[in-house]
Amino acid sequence: MARDPINVGSTANDGTGDTWRDAFVKVNANELELFTSVANNTAGVATNAQGIINTAALITGFTKTYWFDANDTATAA
């Protein structure tokens, strides 16, 4: 679903915008889409993280630990 903005009218109280009910129907629909997207991405991240953990368990002989921040910048520990 594409973003569905609330029509606020041309000027305050001019009667051309969405009704309260229509506005909150749009808010609920937009929020549901965002929530669903975040939930789907979170599940994918969890799956990828478990794959990394499983692969890391197979790697031996290394003594350095690296941390990655949100920008994928590596820091050696």
Image: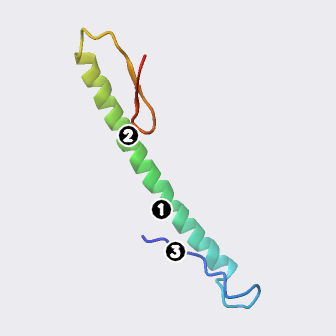
User: Vertically, is 18 above or below 39?
Assistant: below
Q: Earlier in the sequence, mark 3 or mark 1?
A: 3
C-alpha gap between disc 3 and disc 1: 11 Å
Q: Secondary structure at mark 2?
A: helix
Amino acid carrying label 3: it is Asp
Disc 1: which residue: 33
Q: Earlier in the sequence, mark 2 or mark 3?
A: 3
Amino acid carrying label 2: it is Val
C-alpha gap between disc 2 and disc 1: 18 Å
| Horizontal side of residue 27 vs 69, given as left or right | right
User: Vertically, is 71 above or below 10?
Assistant: above
Disc 3: which residue: 4
Q: Secondary structure at mark 3?
A: loop
Residue visible at 71% across and 91% down in the picture: 15
The part of the image, by quadrant, that contains residue 7 is bottom right
Q: Quadrant of the N terminus?
A: bottom left
Q: Nearer the viewer, residue 12 or 65?
A: 65
Crowdedness near tag 2: few (<14), some (14–19) or many (≥20) residues, C-alpha within 10 Å:
few
